[in-house]
Image (cartoon, coloured by chain):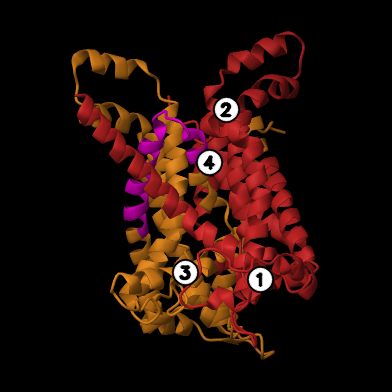
Amino acid sequence: MNKSKASSNLIYVILVLIVLVWTLLPIYWTVTAAFKSRIEVVAWPPTFIPEKPTLNWFIEVWYDRPNINYYTNSILAMIGSTIIALALGIPAAYGCARYTFKGRQDVLFTILTFRFLPPATVVMPLYLIGRTFHLIDTTLFLSILYGGMNIPIITWVMLSYFREIPVELEESYQIDGYTRFEAFRRVTFPLARPGMVAISMLVMAFSFGEFLFASILTTSPVAKTLPVSIAEYMGGEWGYMWNQMAVLTTYGLIPLIIIFFLVRKNLVRGLTFGAVR
Amino acid sequence: MRKLNPGLLMSIPTLLFLFFWFFFPFLYNIYASMHYWTLYRPDIQFIGAENFIEVLTSIDFRNAAFASFFYTIICFAVELPLGLGIAVLLSREFKGVGIARVIVAIPILMIPIGTSIMWKLLTMPKLGLLQYFSEVLGFGVIDFYGNFWLASLLILLIDAWQWTPFFAIVLLAALVSLPREPYEAAKVDGASPFMVFTKITLPSIQPVMVIVSILRVLDLLKLADPIFVVTKGGSGTETLSAYIWRVAFKPLDIGYGGAVAVLYWILMFVLANILVRRFKSVIQ
């Protein structure tokens, strides 16, 4: 009994280790490539530990191209799109969770099915529309589009949260003289917050890393984003500039990891899409 | 005047927003697709269904549609079971489980383009770490960039690396929030661990599994980022999104690109509706 338990524990530990190595190896390779020299990054056989680690690239990427702008633009588009997606997704979710009206199902499913939309199919018309409204090469345009792409997922998740919070809770507050909005702010919103935080983190990750829209709808340091900049280090007269791409990918991981740590506590309750009962 | 229902009132701005930014462009595409229209030339010429005929008879379009579906199926078939397995693995309590759960989630936070490029660095012949392992083990050079099946394997690896964690953390969150009572009852009844898993655990996390699967499948059908940087559409790996990019945006051919976009859009719309309506009862 004890022996089989020990061996099953060993298998268990080995499996966990495999998962961790599989996950960490590409990340380790990215981070170490950022510390290697231009020669060493393409050396054969590859070196596991950088022989002469250098911080050169970590500084150079801020000077060789306007990456500081691209980085800021990515963060702004990430924040802007999350605000837009929450501002439009939450009222729809709340409205559909709390009120019954004719066509409610259709409203919900119409919103949800927008999640299918491939950016590639609308990017050309959006380019022409953006040109007309002078939105090309603006962070606002990216925020609007990323926000829109993420409204369905926010509505979907928040809807199931709002449904689980009994309406009586709000009503008891209204009896005490609060308005419906106040009741929402004081009761429902705090209860639904884990879900909102968790889903916002996913939305942020999606927006921060988006490539297709950004690569076509932004053209200059005014709005171009980090993923586009990373892709631009590929090819060209210098060939693949692995070090720069590795550094920027590493830099790109930092804000999201910080956010991830800040919201960690909400994830377990928040990521179940309110669908565990 | 009849008073609008407040619930509907709250949904209208959202609907208008989505329709304006994402449905209006579709109508624009329908108009464009019926014309000979490139941004290089000022004249636009009505040509009816010609673009559509050209798209539907093009081998590249069919290949791209095949690639999109093929990658959706293989990636989903790998990521869901693997994600579930990892979730079960990490749902146990042991020393260091907290940090393991954090590590497993990191790939989701990587910029997808950066992920793809770093996998390229790992797999380039005479340069990448995986090629080095392969050489040490005696397999020689793996031709990831010249062979459809190996190129597809690489795309599967990249997508699975980045998005299996999505299944894993969501299902993990579901597993750890399950109520304990049914498990205690099963223990009293002497049910085997396998029985407990299939009869109690799976049914209770099924709604979450369905939601996360639909999200993932819809995203997989839009797969483009790894194609752009890793294979550049070579070896038959070009998906529909990458195909539109090549035939429409690079030559600025609004008409032909519009026709591809309309067909792709309709395909996705129908699929999304089937998926969402099929699992309506589970989701709600």
Chain letter of the orange region? B
The amino acid on which the numbered mark 1 sits, given as a three-letter code, is Gln
User: Residue B270 at x, y = what percent?
Assistant: 41, 57
Q: Chain of mark 2?
A: A
Q: Which residue is tagged 1?
A: A244
Tell me the CA gap for discs 1 and 2.
45 Å
Q: Mark 2: which amino acid? A: Phe
- Front one among B69 and A70: A70
Is A144 inside the magenta-drawn segment? no
Letter of the chain shown red in the rendering:
A
Q: Nearer the viewer, mark 4 or mark 2?
A: 4
Kindly report the secondary structure that dominates the magenta region of the rendered protein.
helix
Q: Chain of mark 1?
A: A
The part of the chain drawn in magenta is B75-101
Q: Residues within 10 Å of mark 3 (few under 14, many from 20)?
A: many
* Pick the front one: B161 or B238: B161
Disc 1 crowd rating (10 Å Cα; few below 14, some 14-19, many 20+) is: many
